[in-house]
Image (cartoon, rainbow, N blue to C red):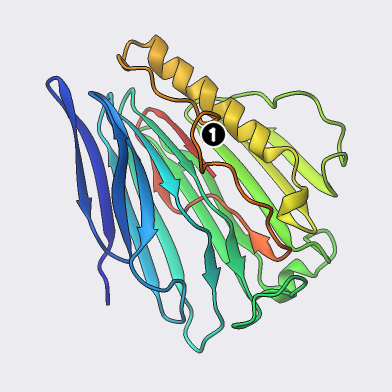
Amino acid sequence: MSGPTRLSVVRTGNRSRVHRTTGHLTARIMEQDTHGARVGLLATQALLLAGDDVRVEVDVAPGAWLDIVETTGTVAYEGEAPSSWVIEATVGDEALLTWAGKPFVVSDGIATRAGQTGGDLTTSLNATDDTGSVQVEHLDLSRQTRSMPGILGNLRSMDTVTALGWSPGLPGEPEAGTTGPGETYFRLDRAGAVLRWIGIGRFRDRLCDIAFDAWCETAIHGYRSRGRLAAQRPSHAETAGRKDAPTPAGRKRSAPAPVNLGCAGAFLR
């Protein structure tokens, strides 16, 4: 049984320090400057099997930045015991966290073919700051629930992009239903915004990738303008491997959960 994967970045004088503890996942530094780092997450074993309890703890100290890159997607296989994937992130004042989650596949069983109904999934997001809740969400995507009218029906893919700490606008003004059967953008009551797309297959999504890149660039620009980033940090468009390959039907991507935020900007997918 593996313990949690821990990842933290802190600014100390004229340099940044990254601390890593390996669990089900291990972290590899891809890039580092005086203020933060870009880190890749790799699985240390087959994931996600029955009974697995994957936990990732992230701490971005005040004034630092951290960009987390998932190298591969994750397949959750059928089994007798439920499995879980929990992320707890703390973001300090004037800090920046960006995280592009890869597809999370909920399969019927061990055969991951296109067109599966998929297994049961619940996902939660609990984002707070010093004032209180920023966003609290719980999605029941079990097979019985998502087949109900007004939920997912015969659609099998969902893509969610979440900004916390500031409220970016939607890039462009797509007409509802033009990028897929359903897309929804809404601002949170406090600082934040959520874009959600649902469809038959993730590869049909033509909205969320654009929004993710645009919102990341906005967040990075704001971070730079506060004088926190001395070195030029590559944009997401310049970084190979961040774009998703075409995704077969049945995959789902969601925001990590739960997340505890300081007074800062965080961008999750």
* Total tally of numbered discs in the picture: 1
| Residue 167 placement (x, y as % from top left) | 57, 25
**Foreground residue, 249 or 90?**
249
Q: Residue at the front extreme?
A: 240
Q: Quadrant of residue 1?
A: bottom left
Does residue 191 appear in the picture of this structure? no
Q: Residue at the left extreme?
A: 13
Query: Which residue is the site of mark 1?
Result: 163
Residue drawn at (42%, 74%), measured in percent from left and top? 46
Q: Which residue type does callout 1 highlight?
A: Ala
Label 1 crowd bin: few (<14), some (14–19), many (20+), radius 10 Å: many
Q: In which quadrant will I find the C terminus?
A: top right
Q: Is residue 67 above or below residue 54?
A: above
- Name the side, left or right, on which 182 lies relative to 28: right
Residue drawn at (71%, 36%), measured in percent from left and top? 185
| Residue 65 placement (x, y as % from top left) | 33, 30
| Residue 20 placement (x, y as % from top left) | 22, 50
Q: Is residue 78 above or below residue 160?
A: below
| Residue 89 placement (x, y as % from top left) | 35, 46
Q: Is residue 118 above or below residue 253?
A: below
Residue drawn at (65%, 75%), measured in percent from left and top? 112
Secondary structure state at the residue bearing disc 1: strand
Q: Residue at the bottom extreme?
A: 80
Residue drawn at (70%, 66%), measured in percent from left and top? 250
